[in-house]
Image (tube, helix red, strand yellow):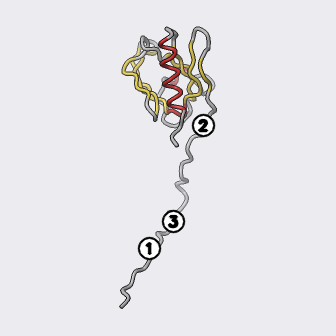
Amino acid sequence: MTSRRPYLIRAIYEWLCDNNLTSHVLVNAEYPGVEVPWDFVEKGQIILNISPGAVGNFVADNTGLYFSARFAGQPMNIAVPINAVLAVFARENGEGMVFEPVPPPEDPDPQDPEPEPTKGPALRVVK
């Protein structure tokens, strides 16, 4: 089954927007693939305003959140893998949802030798 996390993030985001609340996400900035302004990261996390008036070209798909925003007046493209999202909530009242942290995928150890290719089944002609 696919992860329910992206569906819940999109649903809560839409619910917050429908109720005229300011949508924010809490992001694990140290998760692989996260592209955020490091000047605003505190203790490995960053809170991003994702309300429609604050971002451009917002896309929330099953792999992540992608948008453009300004930080200290400088434009930046943001990428947040879905498993890096720790919470989605309203600034005004904190309503939303917190997610369990997901450990990053393990990288194969570059020191490990490649496994020997296994031979497939041997075929022979039987008469």
The residue identified by callout 1 is 120
Q: Is mark 2 on a helix, strand or loop?
A: loop
> Disc 2 or 3, which lies upstream in sequence?
2
Q: Which residue is drawn at 42% across and 11% down?
A: 53
In the image, is residue 63 above or below residue 126? above
Instruction: Kindly report the distance in space between the C-alpha atoms of the residues bearing marks 2 and 3.
Output: 29 Å
Query: Within the image, what quadrant is residue 67 found in?
Result: top left
Residue at 49% from the left image edge and 33% from the top image edge: 81
Q: Which of marks 1 and 2 is nearer the N terminus?
A: 2
Q: Which of marks 2 and 3 is in front?
A: 2
* x, y percent for residue 66: 42, 27
- The residue closer to the viewer here, 14 or 111, is 14
Dot label at residue 102 = 2
* 1 and 3 marks in contact (CB < 8 Å): no
Q: What element carries label 1?
A: loop
Q: Which of marks 1 and 3 is in front?
A: 1
| Quarter of the view holding residue 122 | bottom left
The disc, 1 or 3, on the residue closer to the chain's N-terminal end is 3
Q: How crowded is mark 2: few (under 14 residues within 10 Å), some or many (20 or more)?
A: few
The residue at which mark 3 appears reads as 115
94 sits to left or right of 38: right
Please name the amino acid that badge 1 sits on. Answer: Gly
Local secondary structure at mark 3: loop
**3D distance between C-alphas at marks 1 and 2:** 37 Å
Up the image or down, 91 lies above or below 121; here it is above
Q: In which quarter of the image is the C terminus?
A: bottom left
